[in-house]
Image: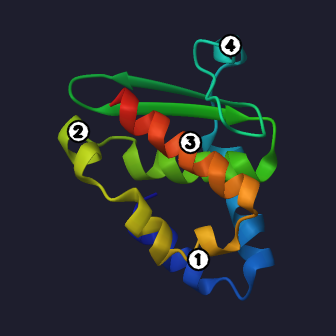
């Protein structure tokens, strides 16, 4: 799965209900953080939902895992995982996640609390890179 494929799949969705269902499906597929890592060490503060992110670097290849207790938020985390997993550190640091979210017309369709939470998740991920 690539960011470009996500854009194409989003464009195929007829309405935002379908896009939300697609994000929920992505969350189920890509949010695979082990329950033993759902601790304060991996918790992202500033989110209304519980969110945990793990970032590892293996041979200059990012491995991101995440989890949330909210289905839509898991979908948002899945988008970040898809954007960054397998990238080098340099590629990840130069990838404009906000521009990609704008391509998906994502932030305009989030509740204010989810938009703030997504911003906190993104800040935290970039700070850990």
Is 89 positioned to the left or the right of 15 in the image? Answer: left
Label 3 environment density (alpha carbons within 10 Å; few <14, some 14–19, many ≥20): some
Point out residue 99 in the picture as x, y percentages from the top left corner: 39, 68
Q: Residue furthest bottom?
A: 14
Q: Residue at x 45, y 70 (%)?
A: 5
The dot on residue 42 is none
**Tag nearer the camera, 2 or 4:** 4
What residue did someone put label 4 on? Answer: 39
Label 4 environment density (alpha carbons within 10 Å; few <14, some 14–19, many ≥20): few
Give the mark, 2 or 4, whose residue is nearer the N terminus: 4
Label 2 environment density (alpha carbons within 10 Å; few <14, some 14–19, many ≥20): some
Seen from the viewer's position, the closer of residues 113 and 87 is 113
Give the mark, 1 or 3, whose residue is nearer the N terminus: 1
Is 92 positioned to the left or the right of 15 in the image? Answer: left
Seen from the viewer's position, the closer of residues 121 and 9 is 121
**Tag nearer the camera, 3 or 4:** 3
Label 1 environment density (alpha carbons within 10 Å; few <14, some 14–19, many ≥20): many
What residue did someone put label 3 on? Answer: 120
Classify mark 3: helix, strand or loop: helix
């Amino acid at each position: 799965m690539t960011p470009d494929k996500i854009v194409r799949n989003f464009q195929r969705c007829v309405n935002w209900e379908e896009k939300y269902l697609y994000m929920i499906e992505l969350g189920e597929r890509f949010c695979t953080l082990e329950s033993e890592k759902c601790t304060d060490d991996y918790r992202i503060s500033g989110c209304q939902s519980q969110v945990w992110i793990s970032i590892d670097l293996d041979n200059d290849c990012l491995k991101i895992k995440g989890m949330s207790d909210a289905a839509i938020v898991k979908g948002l985390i899945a988008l970040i995982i898809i954007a960054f997993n397998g990238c080098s550190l340099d590629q990840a640091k130069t990838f404009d996640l906000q521009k990609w979210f704008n391509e998906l017309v994502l932030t305009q369709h989030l509740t204010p609390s989810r938009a703030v939470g997504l911003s906190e998740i993104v800040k935290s991920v970039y700070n850990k890179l």
